[in-house]
Image (cartoon, grey):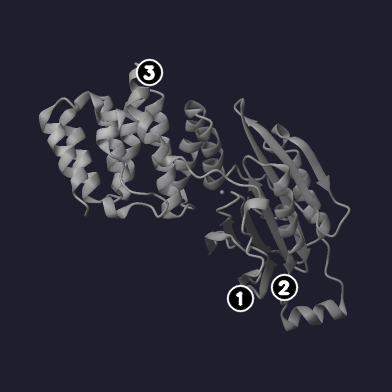
Amino acid sequence: MVSDRKHPNSVAVLVVFTLSLWFFIPSEPTGISQATTGMNEPPTFVTWPEKGVGLSIDLGGFKKDLDLVKPDGRRYLMASHPKTGLNVSVTLEIVPPQASTQGCIDQLTLIQNGPLATRGQDIKLDTAGKLPTLEYILHKFEGVPVDQKHVYACLAQQDVYADIHLSKVQYIQSDAPLFQSILNSLRLQPGPSETKQIQTKTQSPPQIQPQVQPLAPPNSRELLDIGNALYRQSNYAQAIPPYQKAFELEKVEPQLDRNLWRVLIDNLGMAYGMTGHLKEARSTFEQGIQTDPAYPMFHYNLACTFAGLNDLGRTMQSLTTAFRYRKNQRPDEQGMPDPRQDSSFQRFMKNETFRTLVNDLTATKS
């Protein structure tokens, strides 16, 4: 917006992964009419104490996923609404000598003409009000319906810019009030220094021509949401690219909390498995285990993969490890799957050693 701004054997394989698949499909987002929006919660104040600035925004019912000052000096907040699937990101930036509404408009215009928005539909740039906004909807991703709604907004006051980005996959019209309520709640409240107050009284600060920077590609949370939308539609092959891109981004600059990261690894590995790419599935789960060795479902899914590769010994080893860590599941998971009922392992159920093992594993409660 201004200078120096920077903007983060197919049938057999199908049978192997089918039964355990239910366990990893994230909950369907609901419309705003079905969500508890936390109206009695006080507004979130995105503070930047050392800079004397903050943004008031109503994020009742949201969960903070990221709250930090980035290495480039910008203040950044990312939050998600668990019941609707709406994501919000806020970036605060201080610029010399003065931010302006025109700078906001220039940035939104750049986004409008960029590679992301130009692939969308229903593009609308609104510069008439006090809060310039850009909105569009990406109906399809690589030919598959995702209906991802994007709204960008910008506030400028004295030397502060606040960039706000709202996004949601599987957007429906009943989600519109939630989007609007968040936009209506925005209040930028900078606290200028005494020196700056004196300067404002004695002379008008010099005006500079804003120099906008291209918008950054989708971040890992946005890519995860796209992958989840495709995954829910059983479009596993199409879900792999956004999941894989999110995975690569997480290696460089982690943004997902542990539970969302586990969902990413689970679903990426399962998508590979469902499309017959068992070597890639194995690699994905093994990388997950390197980072999070005590999470049981990585081991369980790896066991499914080894079963698809007809490797009895490693299947049994991974299953044993999975049940050893059974208490470390995500909060939204409801107990370990039963390998005896899982089609992934039916090829081994006539093997007495395997059958004895899974009977012992499922009989153990801790």
x 89%, y 53%: residue: 128
Q: Earlier along the polypeptide chain: callout 2 or callout 3?
A: 3
Q: Amino acid at mark 2?
A: Pro
Residue 170: percent from left, percent from top: 63, 39
Residue 354: percent from left, percent from top: 15, 32
Q: Which residue is mark 1?
A: 49
x 78%, y 51%: residue: 133
Q: Which residue is mark 2?
A: 190
Q: Earlier along the polypeptide chain: callout 3 or callout 1?
A: 3
Compare residues 124 and 347 and report the one nearer the observer: 347
243 sits left or right of 12 in the view: right
x 44%, y 41%: residue: 247
Mark 1 packing: few (<14 Cα in 10 Å), some, or many (20+)? Answer: few
Mark 3 packing: few (<14 Cα in 10 Å), some, or many (20+)? Answer: few
Kindly check if marks 3 and 1 are in contact, taking CB atoms under 8 A apart as contact: no
Looking at the image, can residue 1 be seen? no
Q: Amino acid at mark 3?
A: Ser
134 sits left or right of 219 in the view: right
Residue 187: percent from left, percent from top: 74, 67
What mark, if any, has residue 10 been given in the picture? 3
Q: Dividing the image into 4 quarters, which one contains the C terminus?
A: bottom left
In the displayed structure, would residue 278 be above or below residue 257? above
Tell me the CA gap for discs 1 and 2: 10 Å
Residue 359: percent from left, percent from top: 17, 39
Q: Amino acid at mark 1?
A: Pro
